[in-house]
Image (cartoon, rainbow, N blue to C red):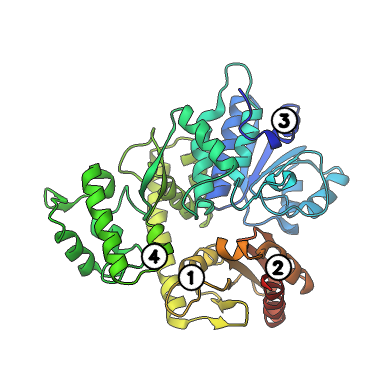
Amino acid sequence: MDPPVPELADRAARCADRLRAADEVLLVSHIDADGLTSAGVAATALERAGIPFEATFAKQLDSEELERIAATGYDVVLFTDFGSGQLDSIAAYEERGAFTPVICDHHQPAEAETEFHCNPLQEGLNGASELSGAGTSYLLARALEGEGVDNRDLAALAVVGAVGDMQASDGELEGANAAIVEEGVAAGVLDTGADLTLYGTQTRPLPKLLEYASDAAIPGISNDANGAIRFLDGLGLDLRDGGEWRCWADLNDEEKRTITNALVRRAVSRGVPADRIDGLIGTTYTLVREEPGTELRDASEFSTLLNATARYDRGDVGLAICLGDRGPALEEARRLLRSHRRNLSEGLRWVKETGVESEEHLQWFDAGDRIPETIVGIVAGMAVGSAGIDRGKPIVAFAEKNEDDAKVSARGTHTLVRQGLNLSAVMGAAASAVDGEGGGHDVAAGATVPKAARGEFIDRVDRLIGEQLG
């Protein structure tokens, strides 16, 4: 079979060959949904190839984490969904013979080079919109195929990772991601279609689905429980089953069209911007082998469930789900998800109540210890577009990392990226200037900086963004 992304076929093949030659491999991955699915794809491919491995997770590859990895004694370390941006540090361990790195990532690479490195940015592909970490791991999985092994079923996890990494924010997955989707459809593990893009179509009762649709922000429905119920009751449809509200996934096509058309009419009449109305409908990705009505059936809900595991130091639970556990691991993930949602809700409420500081080219807030550093970036992204928070400026969020350092998360929009925004370059340059570290994607990036340097860091970020956007 032809490789799904020919531009990266040789790089993936070299990585696969090095892994086959290893006696055993340490698999190290990031802690978000993309990182977990990257690990799930890679772990399954390694197991099918008969390559012994151990999996572990890390928030970031700082010097302390790299020392821990080197101390394990593994000769070969496979990094998924990070590693490229830390290649300068990783290369130092390789030079002293601590381990041989194999990197499957999609973040902005550092200047150092290593022989076994697969990253879409190396071949001119956009790592923020065309290929995720899980997608890059999928290319590795395809390269690891041997006789009688077909890893195309892993395309489903790769798509969950891409959706979780917000790579479908313009309505659908594009570029190399789209090629992986095609393979998943051909393998019988994915289905796609145009549908309502609100989060929770599989699991949320209809009133809650509409009430929590903050991205659409339709007056009289969004954030209005009674308004959502009045809207649904006024459609003349039987939307209850045994007295309980049905979910979107339970509806037939005619019922969906009726609700969608009514939502659009309401949005237009209430002055909702055209781009938000257009965003109500988009391409959805269904994992057809998963149970209907569960979080795992929809790529967006699946990715959120995974985010609720490793971000709370339970990467083992998320990985188990990616590897097929639908028993205890799934129940624990659902418990963690409930807690995750509470934390996000409380964090978002705090940001709305406290507000943000506005500079000439950015807006920012410092949550301190009020929002965990593992989710402050998610909260920042959710806050954009709320009252007093400008969609036309990138948002930068601080949270406490330790006694001396702050975690920084920066979020922009694809519209700003098209105008020249590159938050990866901004975070890297500004953090380096204050003795910190930073990197990521053009639309979303992060850093670790000394708390005492916050003011200088903000000034530098503001100036750099201004230079990019002219």
Q: Disc 3 marks which amino acid? A: Ala
> Dot 4 corresponds to which residue?
342
Q: Quick one: 193 or 148, which is closer to the camera?
A: 193
Helix, strand or loop at mark 4: helix
Helix, strand or loop at mark 3: helix
> Dot 2 corresponds to which residue?
426
> Dot 1 corresponds to which residue?
384
Question: Residue 342: x and y, percent?
Answer: 39, 65
Q: Disc 1 marks which amino acid? A: Val
Q: Earlier in the sequence, mark 2 or mark 1?
A: 1
| Residue 442 position (above or below residue 249) | below
Residue found at x 28% / y 54%: 260
Give the number of the disc on residue 437. none
Disc 4/disc 2 C-alpha distance (Å): 31 Å
Q: Are marks 4 and 2 in contact (CB under 8 Å)?
A: no
Q: Earlier in the sequence, mark 1 or mark 4?
A: 4
| Quadrant containing the N terminus in the rendered view | top right
Q: Quick one: 166 or 277, which is closer to the camera?
A: 277
Q: Disc 4 marks which amino acid? A: Arg
Q: Are marks 2 and 3 in contact (CB under 8 Å)?
A: no
Question: Residue 306: x and y, percent?
Answer: 47, 49
> Dot 3 corresponds to which residue?
13
Question: Residue 129: x and y, percent?
Answer: 59, 51
